[in-house]
Amino acid sequence: MAEFGSLRIMANRPLTMPILAFERFINFGKEEAQSIGALNLIMCLSVVAGLWFIRAMPSIITKPTERIDAAY
């Protein structure tokens, strides 16, 4: 809420997701605000999935493989 309040009061035309959702809700109603909320949720989940993938990458790359010995 601190980001929302300070930007809403101090900035001329802030372009952040919470303020965009608030303006859409005030001007157009719940349906438009829900679309912004869904977009925000998708973006957050993609960041979390990307961070999980980056964290899991070293264990995937350095996964031990079986050596095939030519002596057998």
Image: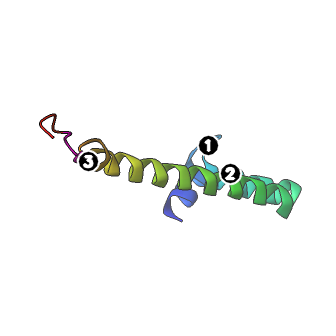
| Nearer to us in this view, 7 or 67 | 67
| Magenta span | 63-68
Residue 41: x and y in percent read: 62, 57
Q: Which mark's residue is nearer the viewer, 3 or 1?
A: 3
Residue 57: x and y in percent read: 33, 45
Q: Secondary structure at mark 2?
A: helix
What color scheme is it?
Answer: rainbow
Residue located at (54% from left, 54% from top): 44
Question: Can you say whether 26 is above or below 14 in the image?
Answer: below
Residue located at (26% from left, 47% from top): 63
Q: Is disc 2 surrounded by few (<14), some (14 to 19) or many (20+) residues within 10 Å? A: few
Residue located at (26% from left, 45% from top): 58
- Marked residue nearer the N-terminal end (2 or 1): 1
Q: Which mark is residue 63?
A: 3
Which residue ends up furthest to the front in the rendered image?
72
Per the image, the residue denoted by label 2 is 39
- Marked residue nearer the N-terminal end (2 or 3): 2
50 relative to 17 in the view: left or right: left
Q: Which mark is residue 28?
A: none
Question: Can you say whether 7 is above or below 1 in the image?
Answer: above
Measured in 3D between alpha carbons, the distance from the residue under mark 3 to the one under mark 1, in whole angstroms, is 47 Å
3 relative to 33 in the view: left or right: left
Amino acid type, label 1? Pro
* Image marks 3 and 1: residues in contact by CB distance under 8 Å: no
